[in-house]
Each structure stands twice: as C-alpha cells, then as structure tokens.
Image (cartoon, helix red, strand yellow):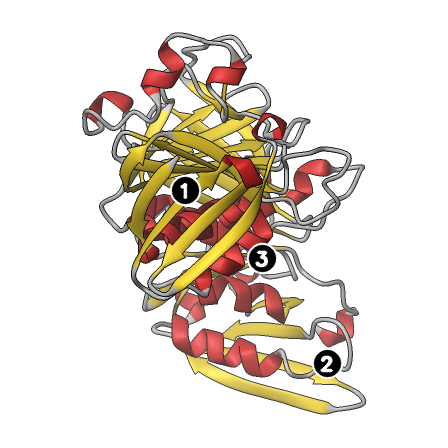
Amino acid sequence: MNVFCKQQDLQYGVDTVEHAVSSGDSESIPGIAGILLEAKEDQLILSANDHKLGIRCSIPAVVEETGRLLVDGRYFSQVVRKLPEVDVSFAMAPEENAMVLRAGTVRLKLQVLNVQDFQGLHVPTGEPHFVAFAHDLQNMIRHTLISVGLPEDRRPFISGILVEYEDNNLNLVSTDGNRLAVCSKEVLLPEDADQGSEAYTEDVAEPTPLDSTIGLLGETEADTNNTKVKAVAPGRTMNLIARILGGLGEKGKVKCRIGQNMISFWNDRLLISARLIEGDYPDYNRFTEGLDTYPLPLPRADFLAASDRAGIMTKKGSAVMLIEAEDTKLRISSREPELGHIDEELILPFEVQSLTKERWSDNEEDQDASSGLQRLVGAYQARFFIDALRVMNTQEVILELGEANGPALLKIPNSDFFTYLVMPVKISEGEI
C-alpha cells in the first residue's frame, strides 16, 4: 500500500469516521476501535464501525499501490490533526507490521492492527426510500433533537427520533414525555435525484467473500417497496449524522433507506449506517389534534429574550414561567420565593378578545357570557421554550395558548415545517 493525499482531505475523512470509533474497551470485540484505510483507484476509503454506528468516507488520493490496513482510531486521529497542512504519504512496512507516514519533515511509524478483526459495515442493497438535501435533513434533525429524552427501559423510543416517510413527505418526531417536536418536509423521490450518485454499488452488486471485501456487509433483511416506512433512530446517532451532513453543503444530497434494524444514509462519497431502536412509536398526532388554542404572533427574538430572563428564576431545576395573554399584551413572569420574581410584557399585534371562538349554550342568558374570552394562561418550564426558539430561524413565531393551563404550541407562520408542543406545569388555582 502506497498512497498520497492532502492533509486537509485526510483530516476531513478522519473527522467524519471517528464518530463510529469505539471509545471503550475493545479487547472483547477486536476492531471496533480501529479505522480501516483502503486504497484503490483514485481514492482512499476510511471506515469505522462500533456495531451501533458504521461510517464510510472516501477522499481523493493518488494511489501508487493498492491495499488496506487497520490502525488505532484514537491515535491516528490525533496524529492527523497535528500534521502540517502539506501532502501526506503513507505506506505499509510489512516486515515491521507498521505504517510509515510522512508529511513534510515529519516521519511517523504507527503499529497496525489485524485487518481481519474489522467488522464489515451494513450496506443497503435496495433502492433508497427517499432522497433529501443534506442541509434540509440536518435542519430537521436539529429541530427534533431538542425533545429527545434520556434512555429508559420502559419506553425506549424516548431516546430516539422517529423517521417516518410516506407519499413523498418526511416526518421527524421526538418526545421526552413533557414536550413533542414534529418536523415535516416534502423530499425528493429516488428517480428525481441526480444520476450516478449511488454509493459503493460496484461492491454490492455481486456478493463476494467477506475477506475480499473488508468493510462491506450486504443488507440482510428482505427488500421492500412499501410506500410508507418508519423507524426510530437513537438521538445520539442522529446528532452525529446532523454534524456530518453539515459538511455536504446546501446543495448536497443524501439517499436514505430504512431496513428492519438499520437505517442508512449515503451518497457517492459517504455511507452512514446506524442501528435502530426496537419497539413501536406512539401515535403522536393525537397529542396535537383537537386542541382548543388561540394563535398569537410574536417576534421570535423578543419571546426568546423574555423566556431566557424568566429562566433565571430558579435555585435548582428548570424555572417555571407563567404566560398570560390579555387584551393586547402578553405577560411573562417567573418567581422563586428564595430569589425574587421577574415579569415583563410583550405587545400583541391585536386584541386577544378578537380571537374569541363562539361557544354556544342552550341557555340564552349564558350564551353571551360563554362566548367572551377573558384571557389565555399557562405555566410551563422556561427551558422548553428556550430550546425551541433557539433552533427556529424565523423572525416571527406563532404561540398558541388555551384558557385553562393547557398545552402550548409553537409554530412557524404559514408553514407546517415545525410543530412544537409543550405540556403545562401543574400549579395551584390561585397562581393562575
């Protein structure tokens, strides 16, 4: 093996695949702490796989001699980051079981691992279910990561993000039990994607023994052409995927296929395969349907600043803020007996009274009284609003409140892209 490449390209490849390098004890499962380097044609392919997440990335290179070797991922990553920004060459020294790397005046010899210990990556063999712009998918993941909860045995889906595709529409959903985030966007059909961007099709087309295709494992589940597919991917994994997708630019595209226990994203230079969370996801639509709420347009920056200030009023845990809408004012307040209290007002673009929904009563005397809306009010954890308002990038948001300390909704004006539900905090009747 004898390869030449740019240090910047090599660092990009290492930064991409090291997310799948195991940081724990790898003695019981050899290979999960390594990065596989494979040189062929005009590219260097880097791969890592910790059995939960597998990543493969190719970078341009001058290959004088093909080959593959496995290096310790942690040490190799540190070495590459500290190299000067010059051309890098590395070759195998078989008599010493080591790789010799040169970059300018730097000469490094690094012991290699047994290539046969590296476990192959899961590679989708069927057509992608959908194609998405990397920038859009990254944005959707960012909007739903805020509601991902901690892992728990009773409800494992809490720690994941639901990926749901049907009829050209992609939904990402997350909940921690106290809030719900739903992101929806129309994506591309596979036939609408650019041609010639299949990843690793040559390797997958004709199965060959594993020892001659190190780093590739075909999809084991049966192929399916169902128009509706869904799966729950770990939140931590989706966070890493979002970070990787950020390097593909606004025009970059990725294909996605959901299998029985794996989800895969790929293009002509990148492959990410992640193990899914087992179990069904609850029907999230029932939490947002039928809510009796009233929309209040607000400047996002002003609402975020007010929520941020209200969030200060706590000695431990998350501060509770009371939101009240009455007449043309939205009041945000928070109090902590041992600290003090804070309250401020935002001006609404219209009177709350004009949003009244008629409520009909059989008693004519009660009819007028029942149709008059006095105020909207609710108590919520301040950080829930802060998290959502920070990832939303619009100048204006829609806050939807009810009359009796019910769930609140955050939305984007004239858009179904993001719906965010926050459950109220129980407080005494006198506080409301």
Residue name at image x 35 percent, y 49 percent:
89
Instruction: Confirm whether residue 48 shows in the render.
Output: no
Front-most of residues 101 and 214: 101
Query: Where is residue 137 shown, x and y percent of the image?
Result: 38, 44
Instruction: Confirm whether residue 386 shows in the render.
Output: yes
Vertical order, 361 against 399 (above or below): above
Vertical order, 233 against 135 (above or below): above
Q: Is residue 318 left or right of residue 162?
A: right
Task: Check disc 2: other Cα within 10 Å, few if <14, some if 14-19, many if 20+.
Answer: some
Q: Secondary structure at mark 3?
A: helix
Measured Cα–Cα span from mark 2 to mark 1: 59 Å
Which residue position holds label 2? 314
Q: Which mark is residue 91?
A: 1
Q: Which is more N-terminal, label 1 or label 2?
A: 1
Which residue position holds label 3? 365
Q: Which three-letter amino acid code belongs to the residue tagged 3?
A: Glu
Do labels 1 and 3 touch, CB within 8 Å?
A: no
Mark in the foreground, 2 or 1: 1
Task: Check disc 1: other Cα within 10 Å, few if <14, some if 14-19, many if 20+.
Answer: many
Q: Which three-letter amino acid code belongs to the residue tagged 1?
A: Ala
Residue name at image x 59 percent, y 63 percent:
384
Q: Quadrant of the N terminus?
A: top left
Q: Quadrant of the C terminus?
A: bottom right
Dividing the picture into quarters, in which one does residue 126 lie?
Answer: top left
Q: Which is more N-terminal, label 3 or label 1?
A: 1
Q: Secondary structure at mark 1?
A: strand
Q: Which mark is residue 129?
A: none
Residue name at image x 45 percent, y 62 percent:
81
Front-most of residues 397 and 106: 106
Measured Cα–Cα span from mark 1 to mark 3: 91 Å
Vertical order, 136 against 337 (above or below): above
Do labels 2 and 1 touch, CB within 8 Å?
A: no
